[in-house]
Amino acid sequence: MLWTAAIGFASCSDESDPAGSAHMEVRLTDAPGDYEEVNVDIRSVQILREATDDDNGWITLDHISPGVYNLLDFANGRDTLLASSTLPAGRISQIRLVLGNNNSLKLKGETTARPLTTPSGQTSGLKLQINADLKSDVTYVLLLDFDAAKSIVPRGNSGQYNLKPVIRTITQAVAGGIRGTVTPAEAKPGILVISAANDTIGGFADETGNYLIKGVPAGTYKVQFSTVAPFQNKEITNVVVTNDQITQVPAVDLD
């Protein structure tokens, strides 16, 4: 699952990208529950950069897919993307899910969904602890492991139910990157990062000859530099990338 997520991040980047930032995806998965449907209305996803006593420091993720999610669609190792964003590198302490009003439960054998009451999630939002450190230029997945079975609470014998979410958070770096310099800068080569399985991630050097290819999953790669005459094509082999680091490679002379 995390390998697939990392491939999804693969993109060409250069030194014009914002400095001191990390990329994050928030994804939702579920432990199976004995229900027909557990529908949760997620409207917004926010990250708290530092632990504070007020609402200062919250960042709303700018790429969000709001909607009603049936948690049981994402059981047994499946997941779905909720939101993604570029965040400042550094410490993040909490995530907050702001829920809407369209939360419902369908029991086994029933055809009509029952409303789920979520008093805390509908107002200030459902807050979860993260406490993770984001490194500059590294790609992360924050997985919300929703336990549907433990999150549904009957309200006495009324036939009504409350939603009191039980969610485990898992933050993991899923891709690193490759950084380097080419000379002369006017060669402006195209750059290909190629895995042993021939998966390819591309990018370009900027006007100063620097490049940064982000979203590269852990592995060993060759890096090819393609330019035009009078400059020469070059290749570096055995470049090792780890998920939580940016690998610095030696400068390449294309003369």
Image: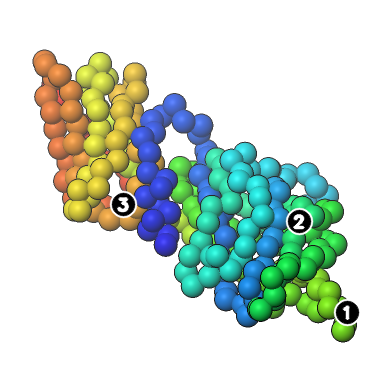
Identify which residue is drawn at 41% across, 48% down.
Answer: 8
Mark 1 belongs to which amino acid? Ser
Which mark is in front, 3 or 2? 2
Question: Which residue was labeled with disc 2?
Answer: 102
* Tag count: 3
Q: In this view of the protein, which residue sits in the foreground, 176 or 43?
A: 43
Mark 3: which amino acid? Answer: Val
- For the C terminus, the quadrant is top left
Quick one: label 1, few (<14), some, or many (20+) residues within 10 Å? few
Q: In the displayed structure, does residue 181 sit left or right of residue 114?
A: left
Residue at left offset 11%, top offset 24%: 232
Quadrant showing the N terminus: bottom left
Residue marked by disc 1: 158
- Please determine whether, in this image, residue 156 is positioned above or below residue 224: below
The nearer-to-camera label among 1 and 3 is 1
**Residue 49 can be seen in this image:** no
What residue sits 20% from the left and 53% below the top? 197
| Gap in angstroms between the C-alphas marked 3 and 2 | 44 Å
Residue 9 drawn at (x, y percent): 42, 45
Which amino acid, mark 2? Asn
Q: Tell me which numbered mark, 3 or 2, is placed earlier along the sequence.
A: 2
> Residue under circle 3?
241
Q: Residues within 10 Å of mark 2 (few under 14, many from 20)?
A: some
User: At which x and y percent is residue 109?
Assistant: 66, 79
Residue 167, position in %: x, y? Answer: 65, 68
Q: Residue furthest bottom?
A: 157
Secondary structure at numbered mark 1: loop
